[in-house]
Structure formats: structure tokens, C-alpha cells
Amino acid sequence: MKKLNEQLKINTYKNADIKTWGVWGKIDYKFKSNFDKILKKYQYKINLSIEKIQHKYLGLVNIPYTNFLITTKCTFRCKHCSDLIQYFNSKNHFHITYEQFKKDVDALLLGVNNIKGFCIIGGEPFLHKDIVKMAQYVDNKSKIQRVYIFTNGTIIPDEQTVKSLSQCKKLCISISDYRINPKLKDRIHYDELGELFKKYKIKLFFKNDFKWFDMGNIESRGRTREENLELYKKCNCYYNAIFNGKLHVCPRSANLLGLGDFNIEPDDYVDLRNIQDKKDSKEKLINFYSSCHPSPCEYCNSIEQRVEVMPAEQLTAEESV
């Protein structure tokens, strides 16, 4: 078994953190007492030891969290979307079928011991007609510990959809509250969605403490591989992403490949549709998490270049052309 390198170390610590506190760390957990806080710290140490043993000695692949993009269609056209959804349009939109979704999930799980957080994303996932079936499918997978649907809050699903989603035991709805942007206040149904999901006892996470940074356009930056490698090592994006059957190190990498002819090296993603069996899946995942993947960084601003911007600022009509 390969020695734990930086990415595997990241996974190990993230797995222990999620197992102790929740997918978003300590913000998911409200302390009831100082004694409770102390217990959690001891629990974290235990979880970390277990994760290290599983990764280093047993060769088990535990994934902290991965995004699975089911559609690039969205109700917003965000100017600074780091996932590059603003570059998709009616001519190049991606919309996965339910049957293909199942095949890709099964291929991923072949070589995985567990996934702490499986996040269904878009675009806007509630624009996909099979969102319920997809959520129910991954909810029934024993290797997946928690299922999330990320929504921007612009769509109120019908009551039957919500009722069906309530059958998912592991599901949590994450609502991004973009009302911090005054121009979007009338488009986001924050309170109505909260009442609807609570009515059916679906767990909710209101994401309203985020910051957006300008990651730049999709033009090549002209860096060397060594320069991109340094950027890769500094980057704080640890969300893997699956787009059109390929597992990438981050959503930007995934969507770049989906947009067209960008130089994303084949070693920088796992082709889930080329998995032969359990052994093949495990080997490819271990190789993926044992390597650095700097080629997507060529199309992203460096840490120093990223400036904070208004969340969900919309493209103007002229910019959308």
C-alpha cells in the first residue's frame, strides 16, 4: 500500500472531522455543554486513528464528500460561479439520465469503503425531473452515509416531490441563502422552503455564512506545470466532483472538461465508465487520491489573485450574449 501522501492525509483528516462534527465541520454541531465539547474532541481523535488505519494499513478508500452534477441547467446566471455554470447554454447543457446516474454511482461505489457526504448538485437540481429517484437511489446505498441536495432556493417543489423525498433517511437539503445580494431577495423562497421541508421532517441546512471569490475566466494562464502544482497544493477546494461519468478533484475541473477542448490530463480524473470490476475501481481510486492533479489549475486564478465578490451577482443581458 502506498504511503499516505498529502491528498490521502487531507481525506483522512476530513473523514474524521465529518464523522465527528458533520459535513461542514463544527458549524453542524451545537454544543449542549462544555463536557459535550470535550467528548467530541476525544471522539475526533478516535475517529482519526480509525481513518488512518483504514487508509494506510487496510487500503480502504473513504471519500469525505463528492459532488455529483446532474444538470447544468440553472435558474441563475451567476457572473462569478466558480463551477462555471454560466458558460453552459441551450447548445451545450448537460442533463444526465436516471439510468446513467445509477451506473455511475455503482461504478464509484465498487471500490469505495464509504462516502461521508454525497452531494447532488446542478445547476439547480430541482430542475431535473428525476431528482426524487436519484436521491432515493443513493439514500439506499449503505456505503453512503449522508445525502445532500444543494438548491439555490428559487424553486418550490410540489408537495408530492417533498413527500417522496421525506422517505430518504439520510437526506439533508442545503439551501443557499443568496438574499445577501439585494437584487435576488424577491427570487429566493427561503422561508417558504423552510416551512415546506420542515413539514415533512426533512433535515435542512441553511447556508448563509459563505463568501464568494472571483476564480477568473476559463482562459489559459500560461503557467508552467510546476507553477500549477504549487497552486494545487495551496488550494482549499476539497470537494471532488462527478460530471458525465468522470470523477474530478474539484467542480471546476469537472465542468471544464464538460465545456470542451481544455487540456485536462487523463490522469487528473477517474473515468467511471471505464471501470472493469471492484479491483480495478479500487486501484484507480487509490492512484487518483495518491497523486496531485494540477492541470485544471491552469484555468483558475491563483490564491493571491482571488478577490471577494458579491455572492450570486448575475450576468447582465449584454454579458450573457
Image: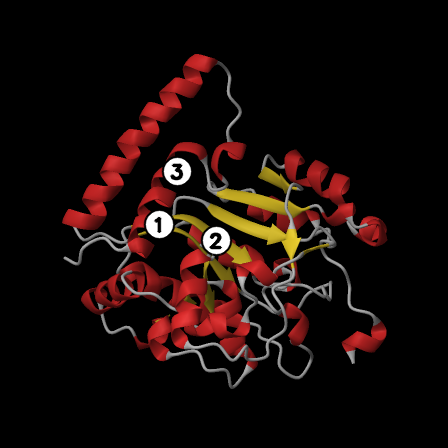
Residue at left offset 59%, top offset 79%: 219
Q: Nearer the viewer, residue 248 or 2?
A: 2
Residue at label 1?
Answer: 10
Q: Answer yes or no: do the residues labelled 2 and 3 have beta carbons within 8 Å?
A: no
Inter-mark Cα distance, 1 to 3: 11 Å
Horizontal side of residue 26 vs 90, given as left or right = left
Q: Earlier in the sequence, mark 1 or mark 3?
A: 1
Q: Amino acid at mark 2?
A: Asn
Horizontal side of residue 135 vs 71, given as left or right = left
Q: Is residue 47 above or below residue 219?
A: above
Q: Is residue 137 visible?
A: yes
Give percent across and percent down for residue 96: 53, 71
Q: Earlier in the sequence, mark 2 or mark 1?
A: 1
Which secondary structure, mark 1? helix
In the rendered image, the quadrant that contains the C terminus is bottom right
Residue at left offset 39%, top offset 38%: 17
Horizontal side of residue 254 vs 131, given as left or right = left
Give percent across and percent down for residue 297: 48, 70
Q: Amino acid at mark 3?
A: Asp
Residue at left offset 25%, top offset 61%: 286
Q: Hey, which quadrant is residue 61 in on the image? A: bottom left
Can you tell which mark lies on residue 236? 2
Q: Amino acid at mark 1?
A: Ile
Mark nearer the viewer, 1 or 3: 1
Inter-mark Cα distance, 2 to 3: 16 Å
Q: Earlier in the sequence, mark 2 or mark 3?
A: 3
Q: Answer yes or no: do the residues labelled 1 and 3 have beta carbons within 8 Å?
A: no
Residue at label 3?
Answer: 17
Give percent across and percent down for residue 80: 68, 63
In the rendered image, the quadrant that contains the N terminus is bottom left
